[in-house]
Amino acid sequence: QVQLVESGGGLVQTGGSLRLSCAVSGLTFTNNAMAWFREAPGKERVFVASITASGTSTNYADSVKGRFTISRDNTKNSVYLQMNSLKPEDTAVYYCAAKLYHSGTHYLDEYDYWGQGTQVTVSS
């Protein structure tokens, strides 16, 4: 059974930082590209960042470039999202996603498994 479990969300002030984690089980983690998406109230789920299975290549949405960093630890079957300089517009539910391939893009439909999401709220 495949499980993706996010953690690390919460309430933070503008300019603050949070680190999201996603623990993955039931997959050969080293074969899977991973990504983070987010869904703000009343809006569609959108791409935030992705990382290849090897961890050697990353990609970011323009809105988070320079502020967010995606990383993975293949020894712990985990992927992370370090979020700095947070803004109120970053408020959303953040989802971890896995793709059954070594690389992925920003297309939501490419990803095969999803976590339940973790809420991030940035107050102004």
Image (cartoon, rainbow, N blue to C red):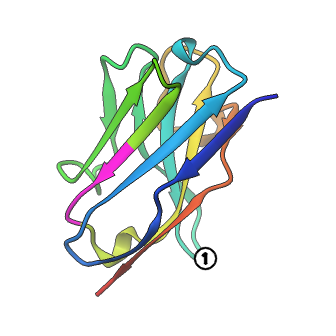
Closer-to-camera residue (59/53): 53
Q: Secondary structure at mark 1?
A: loop
Residue 82 located within the stretch drawn in magenta: yes
| Residue positioned 31% across, 49% down in the render | 82
Q: Quadrant of the N terminus?
A: top right
Which residue is tagged 1?
42
Task: Name the dominant secondary structure of the magenta segment.
Answer: strand
Q: Is residue 74 left or right of residue 63?
A: right
The residues colored magenta run: 81-85
Pick whichever, 50 or 122, lies toward us: 122
Extreme residue in the front direction: 76
- Where residue 7 appears, as percent x and y from the top left, is 53, 53
Residue 44's x, y, as percent? 59, 63
Image point 63% across, 45% down: which residue? 5
Question: Number of numbered discs present?
Answer: 1
In reply to whether residue 31 is colored magenta, the answer given is no
Residue at 75% from the left image edge and 30% from the top image edge: 2
| Kind of residue indicated by mark 1 | Gly
Q: Quadrant of residue 110?
A: top right
Residue 61 to residue 89: above or below: above
- In the depicted structure, whether residue 49 falls above or below residue 31: below
Residue 32: % across, % down: 56, 19
